[in-house]
Amino acid sequence: MGVTSDRVEYVCRYGGNGTTTSVNVSTAAEVTMEIHSVCLPPKESTFQKLKHRLSEIFFPDDPLYRFKDQTWCKKLVLGLQFLFPILQWGSHYDLNLFKCDVVSGLTIASLAIPQGISYAQLANLPPIIGLYSSFVPPLMYSLLGSSRHLAVGPVSIASLVMGTMLSEKVSPVQHPTLYLKLAFTATFFAGLFQASLGFLRLGFVIDFLSKATLVGFMAGAAIIVSLQQLKGLLGIVHFTTKMQLIPVLTSVFHHTKEWSWETIVMGFSFLLLLLTTRHISMKKPKLFWISAAAPLTSVIFSTLLVFLIKSKVHGISIIGHLQKGLNPTSTNMLYFNGQFLALAIKTGIVTGILSLTEGIAVGRTFASLKNYQVDGNKEMMAIGLMNMASSCTSCYVTTGSFSRSAVNYNAGAQTAVSNIVLAGTVLVTLLFLMPLFYYTPNVILAAIIITAVIGLIDYKAAYKLWKVDKLDFLACICSFFGVLFISVPLGLGIAVGVSVFKILLHVTRPNTLVLGNIPATQIYQSLNRYKEASRVPSFLILAIDSPIYFANSTYLQERLLRWVREEEERIKANHESTLKCIIIDMTSVTAIDTSGIDMVCELKKMLDKRSLELVLVNPVGSVMEKMHRSNILGTNSLFLTVGEAVADISASWKPQP
Amino acid sequence: MGVTSDRVEYVCRYGGNGTTTSVNVSTAAEVTMEIHSVCLPPKESTFQKLKHRLSEIFFPDDPLYRFKDQTWCKKLVLGLQFLFPILQWGSHYDLNLFKCDVVSGLTIASLAIPQGISYAQLANLPPIIGLYSSFVPPLMYSLLGSSRHLAVGPVSIASLVMGTMLSEKVSPVQHPTLYLKLAFTATFFAGLFQASLGFLRLGFVIDFLSKATLVGFMAGAAIIVSLQQLKGLLGIVHFTTKMQLIPVLTSVFHHTKEWSWETIVMGFSFLLLLLTTRHISMKKPKLFWISAAAPLTSVIFSTLLVFLIKSKVHGISIIGHLQKGLNPTSTNMLYFNGQFLALAIKTGIVTGILSLTEGIAVGRTFASLKNYQVDGNKEMMAIGLMNMASSCTSCYVTTGSFSRSAVNYNAGAQTAVSNIVLAGTVLVTLLFLMPLFYYTPNVILAAIIITAVIGLIDYKAAYKLWKVDKLDFLACICSFFGVLFISVPLGLGIAVGVSVFKILLHVTRPNTLVLGNIPATQIYQSLNRYKEASRVPSFLILAIDSPIYFANSTYLQERLLRWVREEEERIKANHESTLKCIIIDMTSVTAIDTSGIDMVCELKKMLDKRSLELVLVNPVGSVMEKMHRSNILGTNSLFLTVGEAVADISASWKPQP
C-alpha cells in the first residue's frame, strides 16, 4: 500500500473576530485523505414528509411566523391587522402623510375618471359603469390591501378581454341587460376565483404567466385595443365585434364611407397632444403630472369644443346623458343559471387571472422600490374580495392599474389613503358633475385608450428576451401572434404551453458533462469549459445536470453509454491507460423517480458486464433516500466528493500488480 | 493582512501505473488558497448553439457514428444494413442458430394462433383478422426490426383500445364493413404515426408514458378486459358495448337469464387449467413450454369436446366457419374521407402510441438481458412501416407482445428468423387448417384472454412505487382508476398529466438548503443532513436545488429572503457575530431564464439595501453566459467553490478594525 495512515487535515478555522484559513499538515509526502461517508437525510415518517412538503408548497413564506410565541390578545390584534392592514398603518397615520396622499389621490382621480369611462367602453359597457368601478373598489382596497401605492380601478387588459369574450356570444347592443348581467356575474366569478387562489394559497398559479409571455401578450393586446379604437377615431358606426387583426382591418376599410373628417381631425389632434405629454413625462419623470393631467384636460377642452360647435358640426358622436347618483346595488343582476353561465365563469376566470397578474406584479414592483413586502396570497384575497363585493354594486372587474399606480407613486402617495381620496373625488363627480360629460366626444376616449395601451408595447423587453434567452423570446412571440390572430385566451394558452414545454424540454434533454480535475486542487469541472481541467487517467467523470425522471431516464442511459463509448474510442486512439471506473457526479440530480432508479440499476448492470465500476458522488438527500430504499448501491459505490472517490478508488487499485 | 503570500497546493498527481495522492505543503501556518475565476463557456454563435441543441434533442445517440470515416462503398452497405438489419446478421446465420429459431418459432406459433383469434374478438373484429395479423407483420418485422427476441403479432392492450374507441361510435354488429374499414384505417394511421415519430426522431414522446403510469394503466385495462370476457365465459348474448366497470357489471347482472351453465362449467375448468399452467411456468421458468403450449392444447381439447357433444348440448357458442386462404389485400378498405376519419385517426394515434410503448419496452428489456442495444427511433420506424404495410393486407395493429416475446426468449430464439417460422406456421394454418376451428367454442378464447391479461396486473411493482416514490404511486393510481371508471384515452391523459404535474411541482417548489462546513475539509454540505457540518460565522451559505424559471423565481426570492430573516433572528437570539454575506451555491441551478435573471438582480438589490453582500458560487455554463450577457454581477461576486468564496471574502474583511 502506498497509502500511509497519516492524513492531511486542511482545517478552515473561523475565529469570532474574523477568519483564519489555516492548514495543518503532517509532513508525510504520500498521504490519503479522509473519506467521508454519504449520509441519509434525517428520518421522517410519510406523514411528516407530507406535512413538510405541503407547508413548502402552500406556506413557503411562513405567513404565521409573526403569531409565534405571542399572547392570546396580541394574536387577535395581529390577526385583525392581517385581515385589515389599515389597522396596522392607520395607528401611525398623521397629517404629513395625509397631505401627500391628498395630492396623489387628486392626481390619480384626474386620470381615473376619463380612463374609467374609456375602459368601460372598451368592455362594451355603459360609461357610467367605469365611474362606479372607480368608486367602490378603491374604498374596499384601502381597507383590505397591503400595497401602499396600488391605484385601483378598471384596467385596459381586463376590460378588453371581458369585452371580447362576452360580445362574441352576446351582443351588447341587442341585449344590453343580459350583457350587463353577464359582466357583473363574470366580475363576481373573477373575484371568487382570485379570493380562492389566495385562500387556498395557490397564488403560484399566476407565476406560470411568465414575464416573457406577458410582454408578448400585452403588446398583442395593445395593438388589438388600438385598432379597435379606430372605430371611435374615424367615427365609424358599423364596426365588427370581433377582435382579431384581420376582421378589424377589414371592417375599417369596408366602411370608408362612414369616416367622418371632423372626428378624425379632432381625434388625431388630441391623440398627438396626449402622446406628446406622455413622451415628455417619460423623458423627465419629475414632469409626471403633465401626462397625468393631460387626459382630464383633453376631456374638458374637447367637451367645451363640441359644446361650442354643436350647432354647426353633426358628425361627432358624444357620450350623452349620464345618470347622476351613487352605485346602485346589482345583486339582482347576478346570473347563476341559464345557458350563458359557463361563458360568465370562463370570462371571470380569464379576466380574474389577468387582472391578478397585473395587480400583483404592480404591487410587488412598487413594494420593492420602497423596500416593503407584499404577500401575494393575501393580496389575491384582497383583490378577490374587492371584486366580489364590487360585483354587487354595479362595478366590473378592477385591479391595481400599472399606469395609475406609477402616477400615484410619482405623485408621492404614502398609504392606501390616496385610494380613499380617489374614491371621494369620484363620489363628488358621480353626485354632482355627471351632466358636464354630456357633450364629451367618444373620440377623445379612443385617444385616451390608445395613449394608455401604447405603453404596453415593450419592444425593449422583447429585445432583451431575444438577447438573453431565445426560448423565452419564442414564448413571447407565440403569445403576441396568438393574441393578434387567434384569440386572447387561446393566445395565452399557447404561450403558457410554450413556457411549460421549455421546462419539459430541459428535463427531457438535460446536459451531461465530462469533468476533469483542475490541477493543484480538489475541484472537478467541465472539461469543455475549463481549459486548465484535465482528465484523470482510468476514470471517466460525468455530471448529470438535471433530476432523473421517466421523461429522461432512457435518454440519460443512452447518453451516458455514448460518453463511455466515445471515451473508450478516444483512449484506444491515444493509447492511454484503459478505462476502469465511471464516476457520476449526482450533485445536480435534485430528484429521482422510480424510472430513474431503474435506469441507475440498469446502467450499473451494463457497466458491470463491461467490467467497469460505477460510482456515484454526492447524491442529494431525497435521491439518497430512494436509492437506499430500493437497495441499489452498496456504500462502497458512494462518495461525498469526486476528489475522495478518485483518491479512494485509485488507492484500492494499487495493490494489484 | 493575516494572509501570507504562501499558498497550499494540494496536488493530486496521477502516475500512468496507478495513482499517488500527494500533498505538497509549504510550512506556513496561515495561508490563503489560490482563488480560481469562473469561466464563461466557449463562445458559440446562435446557429452553433441551435445546431448543438437540436442534435442533442434529435440525435442524442449519434446514430450515424458508424458512418464516420468510411469509404463510399462501405457507407452504402452500412446504410442498407441500417435499414434492413437482416442484412447484418443474415451473413453470419448458420444451422445451429436456425435450429434454435425453429423450436422457438413453433412454440410461439402454438401460442400466437389461439391468441390471434382471441385478440381479434377483443377488438370486435372477425377472428380470421387475428390470424392474418399473425402472418404478414412478423414477416415484415423480421426484415426491418433490430430486436432479436421480439415476437410480433396482435396484443391485448392495443386490441382492447381499438375495440373500445371504435365501437363507441360505430357498432361492429350493425355496420361490420364500416367497422372493418375503420379498423384498417386506424391501423394505417397508427403505422404512419409510429413511423413519423421514428423518422422525425421524436421517439422520446413515448417516454412520457412513465412506468408508473403504465403499471396503473395495464392493471386497469386487464381488469376491464377480464370483465368483458364475462360475456363469453357466462355465455351472455346481449352485452353492453361500453368498457367502464359499472356498465359492464350492470350488464352482467341484468342478463342472468342468459347465463348458460354448460358454457360456465367449460369456461371455468379451462380457465383453471390455463391459470395453473401459468403458475407453474412462473414458478419454474424452465417449464415455460407448459404455459406456452396450454392455449393450443385447450383449443384442441375444447374443440374436440364440443364436436363430440354437439348433438346433446346447444348453449355453447362456437367460432363457426372461417374462410381458408391468405390475407386478401385491403387497400380498397382504407377510408380517407367521411365523418369517421377523425375517429380513425384518433384511434390510430392512441393505439399506435400504446403498441409502440409495449413494443419498444419489450425490445429494450430483452436487448439488455442479452447485452445488445435497440435503437428506439429506428425500431419505431420498423414497427410503423410494418403496420402501414399490414393495413393493406387485412391486418390490424400489431407490435411486439410481452407474453409471446418472453416465451420466444425462453424457448431460445436467437434471431428474427423465429418470426419467419411463426409466419410460416400461420401460413400453413391459414391455407389448410381453418376448418378445424369450426367447433372451437368462444368460451375458450375468453379463458385464454383472461389468462394472458391477468399477468398485466403487477401489484408488486405498484407496491414498490408506493415504497419508493409516493407521487409515482399517485400517477399509477390515477391511470388505474381513470381507465377503470372514465375511459382509456382519458385515463391515460390524466396519468400523463399527473406525471408532468409532478415535474412542474418539483420546478415550482424547489428545495433550498442551508450549507455548513464539514470540519477539516473544503466540503460544504446541508446542515440538516450532515450533523458534523457547522455554520460559518457571518456567512449564510444557501444552495438552490433547481433551475430558476418564471415558475419558481418569485417563490425562490421569498424563500431565500425567509432564510435570511430566520438566520438573522437565530443570530440575534444566540448573540452571534452579525450576518455579512450571503453565498448562494448555484451548482444545481442547471438553467435560468429571464425571470430568473431578474430575480437574482432583485435579490441583490434587496440584500444591498440591508448591507448584505451577495456572492454566487459555481454557476453552470449556460447560467454564467446569461448572467454575463445581462451584466448583473461583477467578477468579484463570483467564485468557483464555496470554500474559495469564504476564504477570499473573510480575508477581505480582515483589514477592517
Image (spheres, coloured by chain):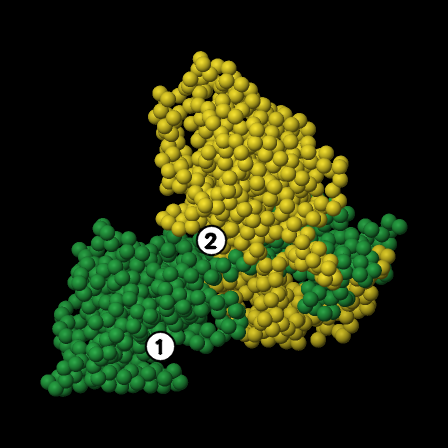
Chain colours: A green, B yellow
The quadrant where residue A584 appears: bottom right
Say what amino acid the circle numbered 1 marks: Ile
The quadrant where residue A90 appears: bottom left
Q: Can residue A348 be seen at all in this image of the molecule?
A: yes
In the drawing, does residue B471 fall left or right of residue A74?
A: right
For the point 79% across and 69% down, the residue is: B28
For the point 61% across and 26% down, the residue is: B293
Residue A134 percent across, percent down from the top left: 25, 69
Q: Mark 2 — on which chain does it sit?
A: A
Above or below A127: residue A315: below
The residue indicated by pointer 2 is A57
Residue A430 percent across, percent down from the top left: 17, 71
Say what amino acid the circle numbered 2 marks: Ile
Circles 2 and 1: CB atoms closer than 8 Å? no
Above or below B390: residue A196: below
In the drawing, does residue B271 fall left or right of residue B406?
A: left
Q: Mark 1 — on which chain does it sit?
A: A
The residue indicated by pointer 1 is A454
Query: Could you tell me how far apart the alpha carbons at marks 2 and 1 are, in whole angstroms?
Result: 38 Å
Residue B48 percent across, percent down from the top left: 61, 70
